Image: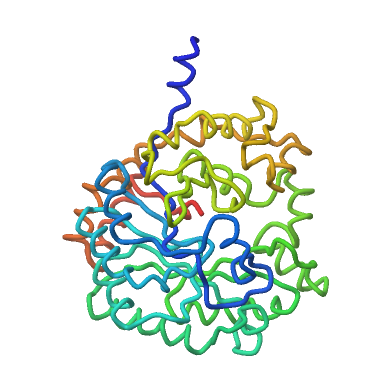
Amino acid sequence: MTRTGTADAERIRPASLRLEAASVCQLKCPACPTPDGVIRRHIGGALLTFESFRRLLDDNPHIADVELSNWGEMFLNRELTRIIRYAFDRGVALRADNGVNLNTVGDDVLEALVRYKFRSLRCSIDGATPATYAIYRRGGDFDTVIRHIRRINFYKQQYDSMYPYLTWQFIAFPHNTHEIEAARALAGELGMGFWVKLPWDAEPAATPEDAAAVRRETGAASVEEYRDTFGKPYMADRYCGQLWNRPQVHTDGKVLGCCVNYWGDFGNAFRNGLDATLNGERMRYARRMLEGKVDARDDIPCARCSVYAEMQRTQSWLDGTRIASTSWRLRLRRNRLTNRIVNLFVNRPVYAALESIGLRIGVIRREPEAY
């Protein structure tokens, strides 16, 4: 294959994008770099403007699905309601599956989530009681979060809508593992999914019983055990795969590639264009690094990443062709026409009927969204 042919084969044009709505946060979670100012110093702490969001969607009509959460708290963006409504009008599905703390949000925004069919919301709640929750989510209030979830459910009843789909995200620390089952029960009462996640930098569970509980949820009791068990870094497929199927863009347009990176960028999608940046020489080289096809290069942010270092150590590389390929089911689900049909016609009973038919004939499969 010629050099031009290789470059064409490596081009990506994903229908999904990660675009941070706010890289600032009001909480002081100990393991997060945002409250210490690390994010602000490296890539800037800012809010996505409505105009930048509008231009990006208008200039890239193939984008049909956008994740808005990453390092900060999405709900601190005062233009969020305008962003949600514009995406709805343009047939673009929005989600916040990286996580929100849901402490500071107006009732009008909660209603907008339902009215404009914000697809999914993953709420970071690391405990089943106010005291346990506050150990890690410093500055947050458990009761406020639960009240906001109940308010979203109220509007879902008012609008007869299943959106947004709510998930309780529980990071399993030594201090809170004993509350996993109580949290799961409360999530069920609130009509939420439930997902346990391993912390990156905490000690394993305090007791063998707690370790076993975490292992049942995640496959391992710590990120180290996960690596030893599965031969690859925890979440590497989801995080590093984002350079192919859901690239991360910062609030000011910096293309970060994945949701982990905050120390470098690949160019600016707002200034230089999304397609040109995603398929620029450095981004293509980074994807080849993650496939193990080329050596690390100092000007590529991945070279400074601990996840990539583990991939090098274990020689556990990604299959870029597999990641970039999309099934007909996914192409059907992730396009603006489908989103507009959902926005216009699909309410709770219609969705239930369509889901039943789709599952029966194989058009729909029950599978989690990519993180």
Position in image of residue 32 (x %, y %) = 64, 67
Position in image of residue 303 (x %, y %) = 68, 39
Give the tally of numbered discs.
0
Position in image of residue 112 (x %, y %) = 27, 73
**Quadrant housing residue 157:** bottom left
**Quadrant housing residue 11:** top left
Residue furthest out toward the top: 2
Looking at the picture, the colour scheme in use is rainbow
**Quadrant housing residue 115:** bottom left
Residue drawn at point x = 45 percent, y = 15 percent: 4
Residue drawn at point x = 51 percent, y = 54 percent: 371
Vertical position of residue 275 compared to residue 362: above or below: above
Position in image of residue 135 (x %, y %) = 67, 82
Question: Which residue is nearer to you in this view: 253 or 14?
Answer: 253
Q: Is residue 302 left or right of residue 275?
A: right
Residue drawn at point x = 47 percent, y = 21 percent: 7
Question: Which residue is nearer to you in this view: 131 or 253?
Answer: 253
Vertical position of residue 311 compared to residue 201: above or below: above
Residue drawn at point x = 67 percent, y = 32 percent: 297
